[in-house]
Image (cartoon, rainbow, N blue to C red):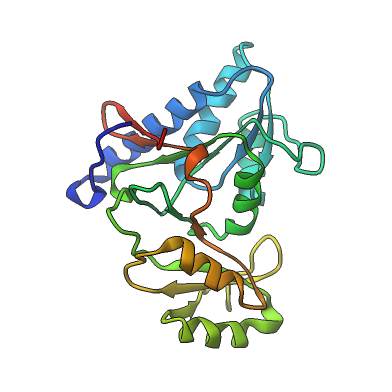
Amino acid sequence: MAIWMEGEDYVMNAAGQVESKRNAGYRAAGMVEDGMIVGLGTGSTVFFAMERLGERIAGGDLSIAGVPTSYQAALRARQYGIPLTSLDEHPEIDIAIDGADQVDPGLNLIKGRGAALLREKCVCDAAKRVLIVVDPTKVVDTLNAPVPVEVLPFASAAVFRRLALLGAVPVIRDGVKKDGPVVTDNGNFILDCDFGAVADPQHLEARIASIPGALECGLFSAYGEKIVVIVGEENNCRVISLR
């Protein structure tokens, strides 16, 4: 287990952050073995892992199939020559590679900046092992980023009210280059919920899950034992696990 270092101690320029993401993604891709079914998360750091997986496939030393967590991940995987499959065909996945908005010392995560949190949690749950690739700015002592919640549009106002009663400041996520809210790959809305510091992620995740119409939230608190966090740095990687 690596020494824990809080990400806010890091000041990185844009070039350094890109190199850190590339190092983390490439390290994760190197941990994939021939014949595996691989969950493919959504986000810039995961795309570096896909890039390296595509190189390995093109070089003839790797034959895998990927389960994408979003249309964006599927499009990028095809670009890199990664064959695709689905959870229907492979309800158990050998390994998943995904990113995170934040990760704490207990390997609790906040995810969902890419609005793919529902499918990402399905893939995380199905995977035997989960590689979380991040740059150092994502490593924190206490989770405190907004928690995305995927919401059934029919119930969005009622869910908004219930989340506010839990202490959140919910904001419906607006689209970019479109009018109106973000619509997920599943046809739902996203509420970004500022709870401040999240002292008990497992408790908060359970409270959100109890709200009718809240389909999933971006807190991942149940998977620490199978998560390996790969923190890319400009010249190396730190690997963190609970085992």
Residue 133 spot, x, y in % from top left = 43, 39
Task: Work out whether residue 10 or residue 96 is closer to the camera in this orientation and state it.
Answer: 96
Q: Residue at x 56, y 34 (%)?
A: 129
Q: Is residue 175 visible?
A: no
Task: Work out whether residue 133 or residue 21 is closer to the camera in this orientation and state it.
Answer: 133
Q: Residue at x 42, y 32 (%)?
A: 243
Task: Work out whether residue 143 or residue 112 is closer to the camera in this orientation and state it.
Answer: 143
| Position of 187 relative to 68 (above/below) | below
Q: Is residue 110 left or right of residue 142?
A: right
Residue 17 spot, x, y in % from top left = 30, 41
Q: Residue at x 68, y 24 (%)?
A: 64
Q: Is residue 241 visible?
A: yes
Task: Work out whether residue 48 or residue 236 is closer to the camera in this orientation and state it.
Answer: 236
Q: Residue at x 47, y 34 (%)?
A: 48
Quadrant position of residue 195: bottom left
Looking at this view, name the residue that lies furthest to the top.
Answer: 60
Quadrant position of residue 234: top left
Quadrant position of residue 236: top left
Please state, as top left, top right, bottom left or bottom right, where the N terminus lies in the image: top left
Q: Is residue 66 left or right of residue 135?
A: right
Q: Is residue 112 left or right of residue 77?
A: left
The number of numbered discs placed on residues in the rendered structure image is 0
Residue 122 spot, x, y in % from top left = 66, 51
